[in-house]
Image (spheres, rainbow, N blue to C red):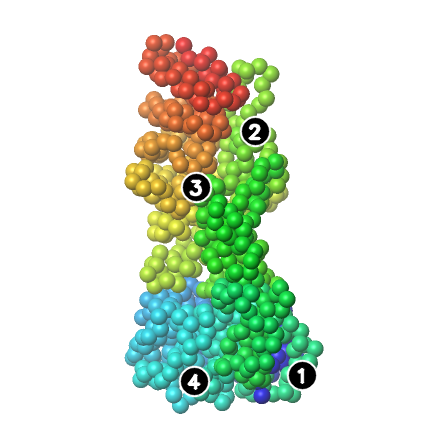
Amino acid sequence: MPYKLSATLSSHSSDVRAVASPTDNLVLSASRDSTAISWLRESPSSFSLTSILQAGSRYVNAVGYLPPTVGAPQGYAVTGGQDMVINVFALDTSNKEDPEYSLVGHTDNVCAIHVGPSGAIISGSWDKTAKVWKDFKLQYDLKGHQQSVWAVLALDDSQFLTASADRTIKFWIQHKVMQTYEGHRDAVRGLAVVPDIGFASCSNDSEIRVWTMGGDVVYTLSGHTSFVYSLSILPNGDVVSAGEDRSVRVWRGGECAQIIVHPAISVWTVSTMPNGDIVSGCSDGVVRVFSDSEERWASEVDRKAFEEQVSSQALPSQQVGDVKKADLPGPEALATPGKKAGEVKMIRTGDIVEAHQWDSTSFTWQKIGEVVDAVGSGRKQLYNGKEYDYVFDVDIREGAPPLKLPYNVSENPYVAAQRFLQQNDISMNYLDEVAGFIEKNTSGVSLGGDSTYVDPYTGASRYHPASSQSSSGVPESAYLDPYTGSSRYSGTSPAPPPPVTPTPQTPLNILPFSTFVSFKQANVPAIQAKLYQFDDALRDDISTTSCAMYPEELMMIDEAFTFLSKVTSQPTPPTSVTVGAAHMEAIISISDRWPAVQRFPVMDLSRLVVAYCANAPATPGGRERFFDSLFKASDWSSVVSRRKPMSKAQETNVLLLLRTVANYFQEGTPVNEGQWVNQVFEALAQALYPLPSRPQRVALASVLFNFSCIHLKTPVSLAVSDRCVSLIYQMLRSEKEDPEVAYRACVALGNMLYAARTRNTPLEPQSQQVTEIKEVIASVKSSLKDERISNICKEIITLTP
């Protein structure tokens, strides 16, 4: 009999990352919602929740089962997750927060747990080790992998198998490596014992391999179209696998016997029961049980609802192949049997293209979804002389014409998003948001009722950077800044009035202007999620694992985000958490190690930390180290050489560098302590102006403006003052396009001149500097016809002898 839906277990609120089914009547599940759940069968086709186990607030990624003892007649659930602790709960009918045992030893996320035949627990972690626990005490520490240990098996109390992101599998006797198995081309994600043969492994390379213990590959199972995450073995010896292609597959005699498609993006985990039932856990937060026994099948109504849920999913055309809609057959093509399990056939029903998959167990075609935007469907649109499947109108702000976003369904959404941002001079921090917009509006991802992308390694969601509200006090005109201002991608609210520019009754009442500007607005949880997502990716790649955050760094970063979450909330709650030198050292260390393309959330964190806790880098030499790290992280030396245009990573990182500096130049900043101010201006003076992007120029003008506000109240050395004025001259000479940039620079120059006069150090009438100021002012007035600029220039002239 084919496998059909038996039961649906719905209580988790996020991805189910692990399941265990040690008996016919018990299911254990672990989820990103920070809980593990115990389920008991109450009828042949239904289970009830009996206990929720929650020891903390971090993801639970692994679960296992310990058989009953005198103290725990129903056995134990063994869980592991992001808190790095293995918790052991005695099972009963009560919810629990306090485990009976906590096994401490791992220094990073616990991602795999297995319980051996005699009760030995083996755990695998991102700390590159596996650990064996006996009687709730550490027995063996298995060190040898070069990357995260994703899968573990306890064959008995002294023999173990481990699989890693380093693409290898290792066989251990006690704590010694006896053999290393190589062959997979990507991270090895799952292991299962195959009786009388050896073991099976699955990998991100989409293959399943069955090995002898001696290291020979007996056969390879190919059919999954993406990562394969989990394996289990049925009592009859059949192999069951689960993966990123939405499917659980049953393999018999080296061939795929059945494919069970799920209405979710990722099938993270699979387990088998002694009675032959299959249990799966998915990214939609649902645990499902499938049975080949008709007496345990769900009702016909429930099975039909599940099939409709699967068939209603939208499949991107590139997933099933590039075909012409006009050439597709009609429903009559389904009368011809398929040639093998999993064969996909597309048919045309009116204007709808349907994908059907051959089920060799029932000898029928099963609808698995509707194909969106089949290429060649006759709906091409022209844009700039080229044909596209879509040309979206994207509103940047009220009253402004929409921008055009062209996209072909054969493209990677991220490539199209990057092109759109580059052509329209919008911050690359919007890359994920624009790509998500494309996916949502092309129905490319609409599985399980959730279009949110889930990372195939960790289940982490995509980063949608800050996208609302303008930066506090920024002297903007109608333009809305694409990073801290209202979203250029989807903002519709009117631009705020320019807060730095009072509407003067007379043209000479602007200077001195001492209200600082800042770039404080941000979506703190999104920045945190992106930073952790990048850390996960670095940790999972054997070539970059050394770049990932250390446990003590992770603790510091967690505390920094906790602080920022509180101080940025409205109203601001009281908090005892502070950010200090240790947190800044962690930020510096991480930004120094991470690749350029993944630094931006770290630099974004720096921008917010200095805005809300300016004393964080205040230890002796701390400011110098911090700004040295910032300039290096932005690849400043390469940027200023202008040997080639900025990469997208450099563009983003330079923008965040300048905004961080602007945030640090605030009222009370100790500009005369140490050499850091001189260090900053020396570095900024190396660049060739103008900077290529408008947001960068606005940020640099804000740096100069904020420094001038400090100078109004705090005298600085003549050398530093001269460097600031020299930078202002460069900006005003080179700015030919943007009145906002020029206006901020003009106000900065006016403040510097005003401060000189109030300190009785006015310019000499015949000095070279006076001549230079007059030339610069004449240049900016002729280049930019703007009333604000005209007024401030008149006032600057009155301060010039």
Q: CA distance from mark 4 to mark 2?
A: 71 Å
State the residue position of label 2: 499
Residue 107 at x, y percent in the picture: 41, 63
Q: Which residue occupies 57% across, 14% down?
A: 506
Characterize the local packing of mark 1: few (<14), some (14-19) or many (20 or more) Cα atoms within 10 angstroms.
few
According to the picture, the residue beneath numbered tag 1 turns out to be 43
Residue 110: percent from left, percent from top: 45, 67
Query: Residues under labels 4 and 3: Cα distance?
Result: 54 Å
Amino acid identity at mark 2 = Pro
**What whole-number distance in Å separates the C-alpha atoms at marks 3 and 2?**
22 Å
Badge 3 or badge 2: first in the primary sequence:
2
Q: Nearer the viewer, residue 343 or 783?
A: 343
The answer to whether any part of residue 415 appears in the image is yes
Q: Earlier in the sequence, mark 4 or mark 2?
A: 4
The earlier-in-sequence mark between 4 and 3 is 4
Amino acid identity at mark 1? Ser
N-terminal of the pair, mark 2 or mark 1, is 1
Label 3 vs 1, first from the N-terminus: 1
Q: Position of residue 284 (x, y in %)?
A: 58, 66
Q: Secondary structure at mark 2?
A: loop
The residue to which callout 3 is attached is: 656
Numbered circle sitting on residue 254? 4
Residue at horizontal 44%, vertical 44%? Answer: 422
CA distance separating discs 2 and 1: 67 Å
Amino acid tagged 4: Gly
Q: Is residue 759 visible from the viewing direction of this image?
A: no
